[in-house]
Structures are given as C-alpha cells and as structure tokens.
C-alpha cells in the first residue's frame, strides 16, 4: 500500500511507519526522524515491492528512505507506565465527553461505585461526567440512578498498541 498522497507537502513532512524489532507497527514519524534513525544505525530499511522510497541528498551522502523502517534494537529503559488517575488523564481517555449523556460542557469526574460505598479511585471506577449527570447520579451506582455508561472505564492502552490497531485497520490488505 503506498503512502497517502498529499499535494503540496514538502519532503520532510512525509511520514514513515516505524516497526519494532519484532515487526509490530509502533509509530509514524516524519522523514527527517526516519533518516536520523537510519543514519545512526538504530533502524533498517524495510523495502516492500509496492513501497515508495524517498531520496535525501547531502554533500556527502545520498540516503534512500522507504515508507517503512524497522528498529534494530529495543531500548529496555524505555518503559511506558500507565498514567496516574487524575482529571487531565481521565478527560483525555474519555475524549472530553460525559460518559452518561455525551455532553462536552461543565465536565467533572465521577466514581462509578461511589467512594462512600467503598469504590476505589482507579481507572476502572472513574469516568468523566457533566455536572448535571454527576448531580443526578449522586451517591448511587449508575444502575440505582437509572443511568447507563456509554463505555466501560478502563486504563489507557500503550500508545504503540493504539497505533498498531489503527495501522492494521487502515491497512486491511495486510490481514488475511
């Protein structure tokens, strides 16, 4: 599958898919970052029959950068940690949307099982709610208040996992 055609995009604004050492799609980086990874020996080219390559020229080097590269080494120091449960992260996870009515204004945090009833302050128990829904629910569970959550609360996924899912959905020709 060829990279998306974007008229008027300069060469350094083109993007390259970065695969892990185990050939899992991890991220999309700009051409400049891909070139740095190739020149420093941190990545290798993954030319496919149908892939496009771009040539970057400097006075002493002509570098061919394909639309896919693979990291050669894994960095054990680069561990992703689940972010703490706080307002900013919960709003981000819930896309700044009330999980009861879908409103995007006057947002607060709500404990699905109220803390007064033993509910923990955890990713599985905290959701975004507008002031109206939070007040309506009060010190009850959603079932007791006759309310339904739009999505089940869960901890955010690793960014590479989210990118891989998006990558495989967009590139369905790779799936069997």
Image: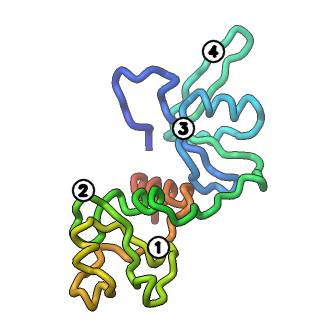
Q: Could you tell me if the residues under marks 2 and 1 are in contact, i.e. CB atoms within 8 Å?
A: no
Upstream in sequence: badge 3 or badge 1: 3
Real-space CA distance between mark 4 and mark 3, rounded to the nearest whole angstrom: 17 Å
| Secondary structure found at label 3 | strand
Upstream in sequence: badge 2 or badge 4: 4
**On the image, numbered disc 4 is attached to which residue?**
57
Q: Could you tell me which residue is drawn at 42 percent across and 74 percent down? A: 153
**On the image, numbered disc 1 is attached to which residue?**
154
Real-space CA distance between mark 3 and mark 2, rounded to the nearest whole angstrom: 37 Å
Residue 165 percent across, percent down from the top left: 47, 60
Real-space CA distance between mark 4 and mark 1, rounded to the nearest whole angstrom: 47 Å
Q: Could you tell me if the residues under marks 4 and 1 are in contact, i.e. CB atoms within 8 Å?
A: no
Assess disc 1: are there few (<14), some (14-19) or many (≥20) residues with their C-alpha within 10 Å of its C-alpha: some
Residue 62 percent across, percent down from the top left: 67, 18
Residue 155 percent across, percent down from the top left: 51, 70
176 or 19: nearer the viewer: 19
Q: Farthest residue to the top: give it.
A: 59
Q: Residue 105 carries which label?
A: 2
Real-space CA distance between mark 2 and mark 4, rounded to the nearest whole angstrom: 50 Å
Q: Could you tell me which residue is drawn at 34 percent across and 64 percent down? A: 108
């Amino acid at each position: 599958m060829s990279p998306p055609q974007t008229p008027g995009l300069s060469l350094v604004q083109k993007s390259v898919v970065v695969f892990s050492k185990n050939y899992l799609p991890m991220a999309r980086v700009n051409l400049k970052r891909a070139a740095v990874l190739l020149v420093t020996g941190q990545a290798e080219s993954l030319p496919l029959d149908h892939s496009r390559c771009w040539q970057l020229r400097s006075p002493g080097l002509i570098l061919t950068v394909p639309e896919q590269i693979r990291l050669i080494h894994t960095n054990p120091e680069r561990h992703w940690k689940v972010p703490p449960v706080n307002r900013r992260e919960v709003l981000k996870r819930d896309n700044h949307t009330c999980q009861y009515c879908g409103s995007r204004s006057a947002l607060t945090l709500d404990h699905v099982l109220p803390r007064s009833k033993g509910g923990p302050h955890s990713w599985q128990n905290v959701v975004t709610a507008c002031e109206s829904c939070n007040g309506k629910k009060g010190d009850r569970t959603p079932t007791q208040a006759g309310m339904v959550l739009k999505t089940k609360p869960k901890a955010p996924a690793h960014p590479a996992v989210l990118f891989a899912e998006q990558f495989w959905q967009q590139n369905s020709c790779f799936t069997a």
